[in-house]
Image (cartoon, coloured by chain):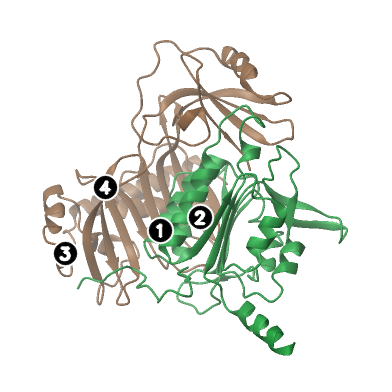
Amino acid sequence: MSSPTRSYRRMSAGLALTLLTLAACSAPTRAIAPSSDPGGGVNAIDAAASIRPITAIAGRLLEPLALAGLTTAPSQIITLESGEVRIEQRLLDSSGLELLSIQSTPSGELRSISRSSVPLGGTVMSNTALVSRAILHLASLTLPLGSGTPVVSAVGDRRVVTWGRTVNGVAVPGDGTRVALSVSGALVGIAIDEAPLAPAPARTTTAATAKTAALLLVPSGAALSGTPKLGWVAPAIDAGDEEDLSAPRELAWRLRGALADGTPFELHLAAGSLALLGWDWAR
Amino acid sequence: MLVPLLLAASLAATPSSTATVLANRTAFNQPCVSFTSTAPDRLAAQASSALRALGWSVDQVVGPQFNQSEALQQIAPVGVLYVHSHGDHYWDAVAGRRSSGFRVDAGSCSNAPTVIAPEILAVRQSAAPLILAVISTCHNGERASKLPAAFGIAMKKVSPGALGPRSFYLGYAGVAWVRGIVRFEQHFWRAVRSGLPAGAAFDRGLLSGFSPADLTPEWWGNYNLIPTAPSNSPTPPGGPRYV
């Protein structure tokens, strides 16, 4: 993992601004052909929601898809685990294999782009170059750039550039902008997530108080380590380890430690009441 | 005598249409620890549901019945395996060196018996390679893991569009945190159910919002594998076509 230098970030921002201007001035890409509508009424979803057609997105990619022979599947309304409703569009090849799918909010904001069959390997880009490439991909689709310093992670022959979301300096784990790339910078996917937040407590307890409360909860032999950090976390079902993604994120103290056998864990205590919201741990 | 042996060998080499889903519940719950863990049941249920949708006949064992002998008996003939538990490179007393594997539930809070690669090899000697293995544990996505080989899966990546064996292995390198696992696997199984190849489903998982510091998924095998059961007629990979 690495982060770009300040001068590089400035250059990337300049490049992105140029691209954004170009994108804003260019003529909108036309869809190759309207999709048929065997179910009846499905295309009304697109019309009512004013969402960007998938064929236009396909043409706007830095590596545009050749649309000849591709077909669009009717749009579908899907509901995520969080309860968030999205409109999904898919582009299929001649054998029916999905090559591109996009998800938009009902108000037309693009939230997710996923490409399939992006080649593995190629010339391995540096992390700095990958960040630049991720910015270019976002800009070419006129998507908002993430704020702060991105993190680049290597996962299974792919690279993921992540701009985590923060609210008043406090992280919202899982939220933000993620751009998945091949090692040579080709776009694999983009996800932009922003969960609703519960109201912040009127008064936040101190880190020391949170630590004292946590020590009363942890199993015998467990120890806490490091300094507690604030975060907007998803409360867990039964205050366990399964996030309730349909609930607003709550401001919590995040405390890490290890069980007696060395297994790392993290506790989440409500920042105001110190009630147990959930926990996470390693397998 | 020869006929039954030949028959058994021929049957064993035929890809099986059964899948096994194993999950450790005990070690992750009270009274073993102070907290509740619903993740093992949830992870097992979503794996089972996705596999059934792909035509597999699924045996699911969650909790104390997931013991060493049951695990090996289940693993011996299957075409797909899902395991959620502790995993590591455990000591192989017979060979005098470390091997890779996972702990069973067996109702134990800690130091539950393990199932390691040589034991799996022994029960799958004449079996066809697994079509899909999802090892939802720590450490078994590392290059050092002996599990892929025990399942007959080479630690190579077959690129999109290239020809390769009908196998796919998914695991996690290093320490894997459960919230990250749940997020990743939700996306993975949803994509697989929608007809995407396993490699593309892995790519979808990368967008699931897990913290890269808490989870490092890895895969080997064939990107293009659509993990339908062998008994199922091939499913159009992208679902029905609309022209």
Query: Mark 4–mark 2 contact, CB under 8 Å?
Result: no
Residue A121: in sight, yes or no? no
Task: Depth check: give the residue in front, A60 or A47.
Answer: A47
Q: Position of residue A248 (x, y in %)?
A: 36, 29
Residue at the spot 65% in from the left edge and 30% down from the top edge: B33
The residue tagged 1 is: B191
Secondary element at tag 1: helix
Q: Position of residue A190 (x, y in %)?
A: 38, 52
Label 1 vs label 4: CA separation?
Answer: 16 Å
Residue A192 visible in this rendered orientation of the protein: yes
Q: Residue at x 61, y 34 (%)?
A: B29
Viewer-closest of A193 and B152: B152
Instruction: Please state if B117 lies on the left or on the right of A27 as rendered.
Output: right
**Residue under label 2:** A159
Q: Colour of chain A?
A: brown
Q: Badge 1 local density, few (<14 within 10 Å), some, or many (20+)?
A: many
Q: Is residue A63 above or below residue B186?
A: below
Co-location on one chain, circles 2 and 1: no
Disc 1 marks a residue whose amino acid type is Ala
Q: Amino acid at mark 4?
A: Arg
Please, is residue A10 above or below residue A271 in the view?
below
The location of residue A205, given as percent across then percent down, is 50, 12
Are discs 2 and 3 located on one and the same chain? yes
Q: Are marks 2 and 1 in contact (CB under 8 Å)?
A: no
Mark sitting earlier along the chain (2/3): 3
Q: CA distance from mark 2 to mark 3?
A: 31 Å
Colour of chain B as rendered:
green
Q: What residue does disc 4 label?
A: A86
